[in-house]
Image (cartoon, rainbow, N blue to C red):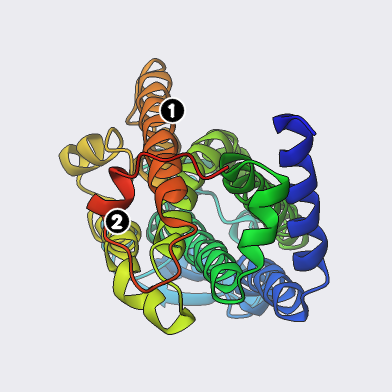
Amino acid sequence: MNTYQAIRLIAGRELRVKLRDRTFLITTLFFLLIAVAATALPALLAGGSTTVAATESVAAPLRQAGLDVRAVADDAAAERAVRAGDVDAAVVAGPTVLAMNEAPDDVVKALSSAPAVRLLNPDALDPVIAFLVPFAFAFVFFTTSQLFGVQIAQSVTEEKQTRIVEILVAAVPVRALLAGKIVAACLLALGQITLIAVATVAGMQLADSGGLLTLIGPAIGWFVPFFLLGFLLIAAMWAVAGALVTRQEDIGGVSLPVQLVVMLPFFAVVFLHDNASAMRILSYLPFSAPTAMPLRMFSGDAAGWEPLVSLALLLLTAVAFVAAGARVYEGSLLRTNGRTSLRAAWHHREPIA
């Protein structure tokens, strides 16, 4: 059996086990429901009427259409109410419909003559969307990395604890065993986020949010390659964490550094997503680039060449971490007499398989 065949064998075994795991299937279904609910429910539940600022001279047809009309003294006061966010739109002399970034269809239809529409800030992004999109990207990467990462570590430790690993390495090279586990985890993670993306698009279509889909589509396209490389990097670290211990209970102690490099970028992106300087730095750091750079593409802050440079840096870092992780994994996998230090695993000289 050559290395390629060994990797296919191990990856196939991991995939079969995981696809029969009820917890994995329930978790995937849970994420799909969240994706649909997060995109469809806000629009479906938004049953309140549009609030419109208008003078009494133009308020009658708006009230007849069932709109919530806020009477103002003049057109200037109506425009101020829109800019302040006190109302969704305003109708001024003309008639002209005023809104911040999107014309409200119900207000336009309520007027007998086709009104002019003036957007006060057409390039503005809805504040809710501006928060939810960064949170969604960061949450998907954080949650997927944690769930699959922990499962990789537990799988490695379980094989050491039950001594099955001694049988496995007698049949396949140790590095093929590591590669097979990582390949399987990457395929499962990619499949899961693909399903989530499909569910999200379906939710947007259900909510008739075609404009948002057009806006977020390019960012999703960049998120996929960044996610895969970022997950590859973190998966190697989780596999090493599992190989350093011989009991499931000890994984938490050795995995703290891995959890930190996943958690800290998550909070950094969520809380600093509106800070252009911070996001520029985060988009080039390997552990935060998988979410920060797609978000910069979403907001239009990144030049066309920047994601390519960031992706290249992430690729180089992932390759380096996988190579280093393979050495540590190889040097610690068959040590079943307790916790192995990184130093001892790194300096292990004898080939194991």
User: How far is mark 2 from mark 1, CA to CA?
Assistant: 17 Å
Which residue type carries mark 1? Leu
The C terminus, quarter of image: top right
Q: Quadrant of residue 257?
A: bottom left
| Comes first in the chain, label 2 or label 1 | 2
Q: In which quarter of the image is residue 269?
A: bottom left
Residue placed most toward the observer, 105 or 131: 131
Q: What element carries label 2?
A: helix
Please tell me which residue is depicted at 44% across the width and 50% down the height of the picture.
329
How many dots with numbers? 2
- Judging by the rendered image, the residue that carries numbered circle 1 is 315
Which residue type carries mark 2? Val
Whether residue 295 is visible: no
- Judging by the rendered image, the residue that carries numbered circle 2 is 261
Left or right relative to 56: residue 106: right
In the orientation shown, which residue stands out farthest toward the bottom?
249
Whether 177 is drawn above or below 84: the answer is above
The N terminus, quarter of image: top right
Please tell me which residue is depicted at 30% across the width and 45% down the height of the picture.
346
